[in-house]
Structures are given as C-alpha cells and as structure tokens.
Image (cartoon, coloured by chain):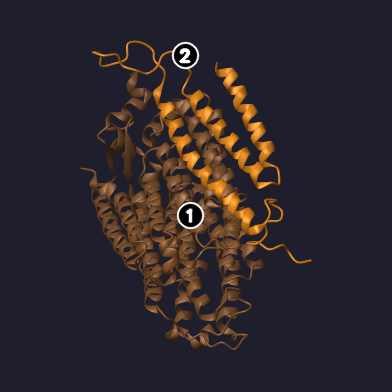
Chain colours: A brown, B orange
Amino acid sequence: MSWYLSLPLILPFATAIICYLLRDRPSGAWVSVAGSALGLVAAIVLMALVLQNGVVAGQMGEWPAPFGITLVADLLSAVMVLITAITALAVAIYALSDVDARHGQLGYHALFQILIAGVTGAFLTGDLFNLYVWFEVMLIASFGLLVLHGGKEQIDGGVKYVALNLISTILFLTGIGLLYGQTGTLNFADLAVKVDAVENKALLTVIAMLFMVAFSVKAAAFPLFFWLPAAYHTPSFAVSAVFAGLLTKVGVYALMRTFTLVFDHDVGYTHTILLWVACFTMVTGVLGAAAQSDFRKILSFHIISQIGYMILGLAIYTPLAIVGAVFYLVHHIIVKANLFLIAGISQRLTGGSDVFKIGGLYKSSPFLAVLFLIPAFSLAGFPPLSGFWAKYIIVKASLDESLWIVAFIALAVGLMTIYSMTKIWAEAFWKDHPDGIDPKLSALPGRTALLVPVIGLALLTMVIGLMPEPFVTFAERSAAQLLDPTEYITTVLGPEAMQAADPLEVAP
Amino acid sequence: MEPLLSILIGVLVAGAVYLMLARSLMRFLFGLILLSNAANLAIFVSGRMTAGAPPLVPDGMDVPPEVVANALPQALVLTAIVIGFGLFAFALILAVRAFRSLGTLNTDDMRVAEPKEKG
C-alpha cells in the first residue's frame, strides 16, 4: 500500500548492490544511470500522488503510527525527493565520463547510490530517530566518496569533514535523547502534538538549541561552516557536485521540518537567533568567496552564503518567507550542482581550477560560457532566472516585516555574489589562457556525458525563471502545509489526534 | 540512580571536551568516543530507569504483568552504538591513513587542503 513511499528508497539501495557487483566492469556506471532514471520516475509518481491527495503517510510493517517506522511525504518532502532524483540522474550521467574505471572499481557508483538513498530517506522519514539513522547512511557514504581518491588533499579535507560532522551527529543524538525524555515519543507528528503539553518550556528551548546547532553544522551555517570550504574542493567533480547540491540542503530541510513542526513554542527566541545566524551566514559566505581564487572554493563559500537565504526564510517565519525558503531550496540545488559540474568541465579543458591560472574559455568554447552564465546569473539573482524570484520573495518577506537591515544585507550579498561570478567570468572565461592553451570544447573526450546534465539543469533553471508561477503556487501550498501541520498530523496519526491535543475538546 | 548517571554523563562530557580540545587527532577521536557514550547514556536515562524489571511478556499473557523497563531507549541506544561503532572504525582508519600520507596527526600542521596564509 505504501510502495510508492518506499520505492524511492529501495531503488537506490538495489542499484547500489548491482553497481557493487558490477564494479569491475564499465557497465556499472550505466547501471547507476539506469537506477537513477528509475528513481526519477518513482519520485515523479510520488510527487503526482502528493499533489493529488495531499500528505501521504505509510507505516512500515503495518505498526501503527507513533510506534512503528513512519514514512511521510508532504509537498516539501516530495519536492525534495524529486529534486534529489533529478540531481542524482544528472550526476550519474556526468560520472560516465568523470569517474574513471579505477574509482568505479573502488565502489564509487555503489557509494553514490547509497548517498542518494540516505538523502531521500532523510526527506521521507516521519520520525526523528530515523532521521538520525538516514543522516548516518548519508554521512558514511559521503565519507567514502570524499576519500576515494586517497590523495593528501582528500585525506586532509576528509579529516575535518568527518570530525565536525561526527560532533554534530552526537549533538543531534543527545537532543533526541532529551526530547524523548520530555515527550516520550520521537514521531514528528506525535511530537508536534505532545510538545505543547511539556511543562518545562525552558528545557524545551535548550533541546531546540541542541537541534539547531546540530543541524546548523550539517547546513554549514555561521559559525559552524568551517568543514565545508575545507573539504568540498578536494574530491572528484561529480562527487563535489552532489555534495554541493544535496548534503547541506538536508541540514536546511531538517531545520525547516523541526522548527515548523516541533519547536514552535518560542518563536520569538529561537527564530530570532536563526535570523541573525542567517545574516552572518550570508555575509561571511560571500566575503569568504571574494577572497578565494580556486573555482570550487569560490563556489563552496557561495553555498554557505546561499544557505543563509534559506535559513532567513525560515527565520522570518511568515507564510511568504517560508514560500521563499522552499523556492530557494529547490532553485539552489539545481544551480549549485550545475556550477560544480561546469567547474569540472572547465578543469578538464584548461587543466587547472585556480581561476587566475586558467582562461580563454569564452573564445574557444563559447557554448560553455553561455552554460556557465545561466546558473551564475541565476545564483546572483538576475531576472528572469530562477534565483531572481527566490531572492525577490525572501527580500519582499523581510520588507513586509519591516526588517530593513536584513533586507539590505540580503540585497548587498546578492551584489557581492555578482562580484564573485564576474571574477570567475573575467579570469576563467574572458582573458586569454596564460599558458596559451586553446581549450576547445569540441576536442574534449567524453563531452556528451559531461554536457547533457549541464544543459538539462540549465534548462530547468530557465524554465523555473521564465514560468515561475506554477512553482511559486507550489511553494505557497507547501508553506501552508508547513505552517499549519494539521494535515500532516492527521494523516500520520489518524483524525482523532488533533482533537485529543485540544484541551477544550477533552474537558468541555 | 538517575542523579548518579547524570553526574557520570557530565564527567564523560567534561573529559570528552578536554580531549577534543587537544591538537592531536587521536586524542580528538578518543574524546569523540567518550562524547558518544555520554550521548548514549543520556538517551538511556531519558527513558527513565526501572531496576530489575526486564521488558518481557510471560508465557500465556498478551501484556507484561506490571511495571517493566522501557524497551525503546534500549533499542535506540543499541542502534546508536552500532552506528557509532561503524563511524569510529572509519574515523580511526582515516586517522591511520592521514598519518601515513601527511606524516603528522597534529591538526595545526594538517594544512594541505587549506594551505596556510602567506605572510
């Protein structure tokens, strides 16, 4: 009955097993592509069902809700699963050329599929402890992918990534334990109901802060982002693209889920902290990017600054702001993964990733230049690309709440983003290559597999930008679900759950 | 029982923080192990302690006879221990690899991915 909820999870796991068995053959990479394509179909089916029926929930093993393992898909979960599947397919195709036979043999494709399973599981789970388990699935796969090359740089970046992520995991686990002690449940829907009955609100706020810190590390928010620029520029491009697109966004998703559904008892305190965290995240990220010269390091710091916008949307906590956060989340995954994929092509063409030491891409590969401009301008927020609408909604939401300084910071950070993007443009694309290399795209071996995902993601950015209305309408519905969790709770626990929570109905 | 265990958790966390502030990667990892054990104990205590009452249903009955220990935190802790074990196995191997390829476990000297600032 709940096959459509478990299918997006089963498919990547099954693909991972087949990929591992076929790791010595080149067909393993194609199995990964085929599995990701099937995963995309499963995600589309799930999306269609959620659009039609509202929130869908499934109890694994038919154990009823607060006791068993629950999978839930509301609009936010469904869209995150869909966008994960799209990114997975794009990166799987890119990996056909980018990942060589040796890394395939070491198990790249299997680890990649397990990573996708972990990310999808984190989006679909309806239970806090299972969220922890999916985080671990995702983490261990990402550890493996990060150090697969085994070079000095990868090991060094890997140590920092592993260390900080393990701390965050333990904080998360402690938070789970304390929250369980207070409420006696870990099911999201059940928590949303029972958390109101907790008498010691101060302790609840402490627990909320534990979760905030744990998820902020995952999301790379200020001041806990140091692992990200230390690690993201070291692995292969296919790996860093999927990291950049998906991993931090799982942290943002977890923040959005817990701080709308569970910890909404003291919005004035928790969300004010989030607001300033968001502002500092935006500013430090964009300033860090300005100081870098490596293609991927610039992009890594921009992940941080963009994470700030999403957290800002959550922190303002009005319906419009949540709409902006959801829209931003979707837009950013597509754009960021795409930019990392383009960075990979540019390294292949020019032989380097330090933008001051490469160049000539515009003259010799104008098509790639156009492909770069689309996500780069979208990231900076140029109309009519997807980033413009995302930024517009967030800034509008902060102006509506008379948060003038916040709106100013958001706009100024957008301007600084353009600075970084023009730096990449001027150095890597416009000027001649200092070593006189003529990087022709048409001479690149295996270019079809590299270009197809880049073109696909760029088209998606254009579609969202030119026809934002269905996407904004979708984000509005999704935000409405987040701010009024009644449908989520009744779907998971049954229609009686809300009535029991209302003290007026219990004692008339 | 609860106050005693709470103090123990506090001691474990304090030791963990002390170890994790050290420069050596190995000390950091040992601190992490202590911290994760503290977290596991915290879950265990949160589920309330019930002495000498295993959560078993006797033959011929559908529900346990009287008050029994809460089985859920035990299951959670067990899962967390297993996951933590896997992660630490990986982290320790990573430390060995780091020592072999970088020649140091001093985190101040591990500056390959992020080279030191010039000047």
Q: Disc count in the image?
A: 2
| Residue type beneath disc 1 | Gly
| Residue type beneath disc 2 | Ala
Rendered residue at 37%/78% (across/down): A448
Rendered residue at 79%/66% (across/down): B119
Quick check: A469 above or below A60?
below
What secondary structure is found at the residue carrying circle 2? loop
Residue A103 x, y percent position in the rendering? 45, 64
Q: Nearer the viewer, mark 2 or mark 1?
A: 1
Q: CA distance from mark 2 to mark 1?
A: 42 Å
> Which residue was labeled with disc 1?
A144
Q: Chain of mark 1?
A: A
- In this view, the residue farthest toward the right is B119
Rendered residue at 62%/65% (across/down): A289
Work out whether disc 2 and disc 1 sit on a shared chain: no
- In this view, the residue farthest toward the top is B66
Residue A245 x, y percent position in the rendering? 46, 60
Residue B99 x, y percent position in the rendering? 64, 53
Point out the image quarter for the C terminus of chain A. Answer: top left
Tags 2 and 1 touching, CB below 8 Å: no
Q: Chain of mark 2?
A: B
